[in-house]
Amino acid sequence: MASRPAPDLAGLDPADERDLRLAGLLVLRDPPKADAAGAVRRLAALGVTVKVITGDHPAVAVRVCEQLGLPVTGVLTGADLARLDDAALPAAIERASVFARVSPEDKARLVRAQRTAGRDVAFLGDGVNDALALHAADVGISVDTGADVARDAADVLLLDKDLDVLADGVTEGRRIFANTIKYVLMGTSSNFGNMFSAAGASAFLPFLPMLPGQILLNNLIYGLSQVAIPTDRVDADQLARPAHWDLREIRRFMLTFGPLSSLFDFLAFALLLGVLHAGPTEFRTGWFVESLATQTLVVFAIRTRASPFWRSRPSRPLLAAALAAVAVAWLIPYLPVAGPLCFGPLPPVFVPVVVALTVAYLALVELAKRTLFASSDLLRPPGRAPGPTGPQQAAAPQAGTQQAGAPQARPPEASRRRRTHRRAARFTTR
């Protein structure tokens, strides 16, 4: 700030800026939020690569990165990007972590380049200049106080200007995915096994191995016990890296654990018919109890990569629901409803047999899961990250800076198809 007396000056032009007396320096400071550095570290720990894309001067962007503790591996400006063709752009993006003096078109080009390379990209921005990149990203993120065009282009609006919300979202998403996979693996393997057992038993039995009402009751008790799966704990190693939805892996689990379940069903059939000489009522009762015990308790082995499985504690609701389902299955044959359901009391000798079969089944599942989980992408272990990641935008509101990171890769065609469906959903009616 500088001045000089000019009592007779009626207008100002550049020539009047002379003979000024320095009064001082006016400095504008917009520091990062105090919790931003911790949020960036959390994202890095989750395997999310964070990059900065900004229209500001490179020195400003680098300084913000230093304040956040974000390593600067390289700096590219808009002029540098203009000299790169689309083929060379992905490699340049991998080497750099700061992109400064870029235009809105440059931001969108960076996002599209990473998506074309098969990366999952999220972009966070709150200004008019971010609208193109928000549209181009897999997930566009803005804040509720951002520009109107940025809010309209975004898929997610943050009500709090806090990057920890992004880390919380990544963690919660992986927890939900892991619990969903638990149910899918259990449901496909147990249903396939029960179908195989019923078909096999029907081939040599002179009666139905289980009545339709009994099958429905079995499915009802089993389904109710799985309602508690969303409350289950997820191991830290499953939250550390992204997992992938893969139908081939699910089919492999189904074809492994399904026949394994049927093997113990057939063993129970042999004991019921060959040793206990069970009639239709005793046979159906015995299989009902045995099948519910094995298919319900197997959740404790499938839910975790830990071996043995009891090293990872399930949630209390899941533990209570599974044990309650087994207890109900054991009690039904001795309750007044047993008659209408065509059940009957089991011979006392069959109780330890079912317990032994269940324990043996869980032990064999524990051995089988070690091989399956070791090569599975559904529940990726730590240290098996999906390779180099590209920019996924998540912006710090200060200084017009955007940050980026990408947790996992996906084929470009699948990414484009998913985005098309997501965009079209806005214009559909329920």
Image (spheres, grey):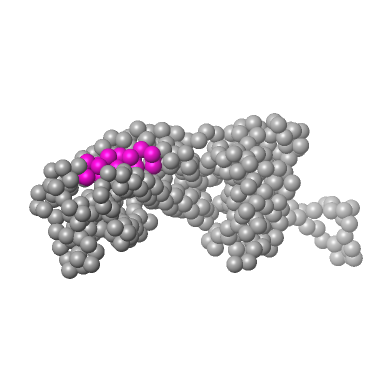
Compare residues 268 and 55 and report the one nearer the observer: 268
Looking at this view, is 186 or 266 the one in front?
Answer: 266
In the displayed structure image, the side of residue 206 where residue 371 appears, left or right? right
Q: Is residue 263 magenta?
A: yes
Q: Which residue is drawn at the image coordinates 84% and 52% (left, top)?
A: 18
Residue 238, given in percent of the width and then of the height, sits at 40, 43
- Which stretch appears magenta? 253-269
Q: Please give the name of the residue rendered at 39% of the width and 42% of the height, measured from the top-left corner.
A: 254
The residue drawn where x is 19% and y is 56% is 281
Q: Quadrant of residue 367?
A: top left
As drawn, 90 above or below 128: above
Count of numbered circles on the image: 0
User: Is there any visible trace of residue 167 in the rendered image?
Assistant: no
Q: Residue furthest left?
A: 348
Task: Name the main secondary structure of what is drawn in magenta.
Answer: helix
Q: Kindly indicate the quadrant of the structure image that contains residue 94.
A: top right
The correct choice, above or below, for 265 with respect to 345 in the image is above
Q: Quadrant of residue 322?
A: bottom left
